[in-house]
Image (cartoon, grey):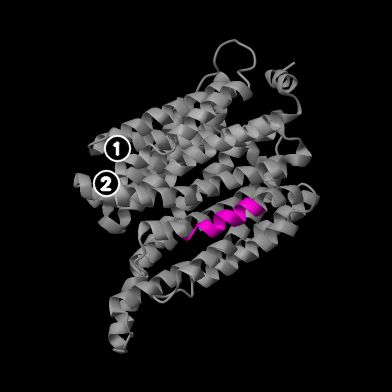
Amino acid sequence: MTQRDRLHLRYGPRYRLWVTLTVMLGLVALGMSITIVNVAIPFISDDLGLSEAEAQWLSTGFLASTTVSLLVAPWLVHAIGQRATYAGLLLTFIAASILGGLGNGMAMLVAARVIQGAMTGLIRPLAMQVLFDVYPAEGRGMAVAMYGMCLGLPLTLATVIGGWLVEHLSWHYVFFVPLPICAAAVVMGGFFLPPREGRGPLPPFDWAGAGLLLAAVFALLTALSSGQRWGWSDPRIVGLALFSLVAGAAFVAWQRRCAQPLMDLSIFRYRLFVVGTLAMLLFGGTFYSVMYLLPQFVQSVLHFSPITTGMIYLPSTAVLGVLVPLVGWLSDRHPPLWLTLPGLASTAYAVWRMAQMDAGTSFAALAGIMGIMAIGMAAYPPPTLANAIAALPARLTGYGSGMLNFVMQLGGALGTAGLVILLEHQTVVHGRRIAAAGAPTGEVSPDGRASILAYQDGFWMMVISLVILIVPTLLVSRWRRD
């Protein structure tokens, strides 16, 4: 009898519910750290006198450690078990949050954000693996739906709460908001998550693979985040890009030779998993790009306050709360196309509406657009993730969940960087055209009009990416039947 079987016997039919609530608490708490500190970065920079380059490390360090640690979770669970992994990462996150909240200099804040990012990366594949362990094959659509809601919900909560805190109290408090939820999650994890199966020596850790991956990701993210500041033709950017490419190739080569690899590359032998991974790369890139571009537009063009910006996302939270259980139930009973195509259409329509926004766009219009987009956020990922993971044997589930989260995070980083490049370029292009035409721009200045047109171009690029996403979406449904 396994440790999980013993917990099933102890807690009875409600055990699955308790496990779901346990991992949901952790996902929400750590998910809030993604955006709640980003809201405060301008205030942190002003308070501590940080330069733009120094402030960028708060985001780049978090993103790099999150991306790499996504692939470390399977080894950690195998080494010390789900209970110890869950409690350990939450307690480490609490310590890092306290360090950040009490921080009075760049070094302390960057260290706190790097540790927070690593723990945030660890919890995502762990949570997905835990849910897949307690839900039967015919109920995993619901499991993934709940998982997806816990990735989207914290973004809304963090934006609203973080905006209020920095306006009325201090940026220091944004680090402390998730701590009570983390403490509750630690207690529940001690009751409902299983300890390590068996005893014996710890499995060897792939230090070389982790180092190569960290080097590749960190160099890539540094190049992407610094390109606008240094210039994309700067030798430092070119060198970082080449170094990232070489380190990434070395990582793949090492994983093929290593006896105990960080990432089991055999997951890519399953074509349904591969096409599902591609789909989530594109969808994740679009989602994170919207979450980057929309607040920028709202605050720089419409001049909304941080609190008002956060309030835009409230209707989408309500939509997610209503639709997620329904989508989970439907995805366990119907082909994925019944959900993914309507979800994709809703997302594409919402982003198309964003491409029409200008200086006169109202709060109500923005909130309605986000409500429509939430339909896609609820309907698309659960069946796609569930079918991709279902294509793998049980021994590869942990690696598969880590890779899916990895590509979503990487897609977001690449999509956001691409948008930054596009905005910079198109703002200049539109500015020149407006100046050459000498046409009046109404109440908006020529520079403001050029900025609006550049934002519209950015949203149009995301519409195009969603159209491309139709291809892997159809393949997921087709190969699932095969």
Q: Under tag 2, what secondary structure?
A: helix
Residue denoted by label 2: 44
Q: Nearer the viewer, residue 448 or 95?
A: 95
Q: Name which residue lies at 71% across and 53% down.
A: 476
- Check if residue 345 falls in the magenta segment: no
Q: Which residues are magenta?
A: 312-322
The main secondary structure of the magenta stretch is: helix
Earlier in the chain: of badge 2 and badge 1, it is 2
Q: Look at the image and tell me whether residue 279 can be seen.
A: no
Question: Relative to residue 144, is residue 474 depicted above or below?
Answer: below
Q: Amino acid at mark 2?
A: Ile
- Quadrant containing the N terminus in the rendered view: top right
* Spatial CA span between label 2 and label 1: 10 Å
Q: Under tag 1, what secondary structure?
A: helix
Q: Are marks 2 and 1 in contact (CB under 8 Å)?
A: yes
Q: Nearer the viewer, mark 2 or mark 1?
A: 2
Q: Name which residue lies at 66% across and 54% down.
A: 323
Q: Name which residue lies at 43% across and 45% down.
A: 34
Question: Relative to residue 430, is residue 420 depicted above or below?
Answer: above
Residue denoted by label 1: 109
Q: Quadrant of residue 83?
A: top right
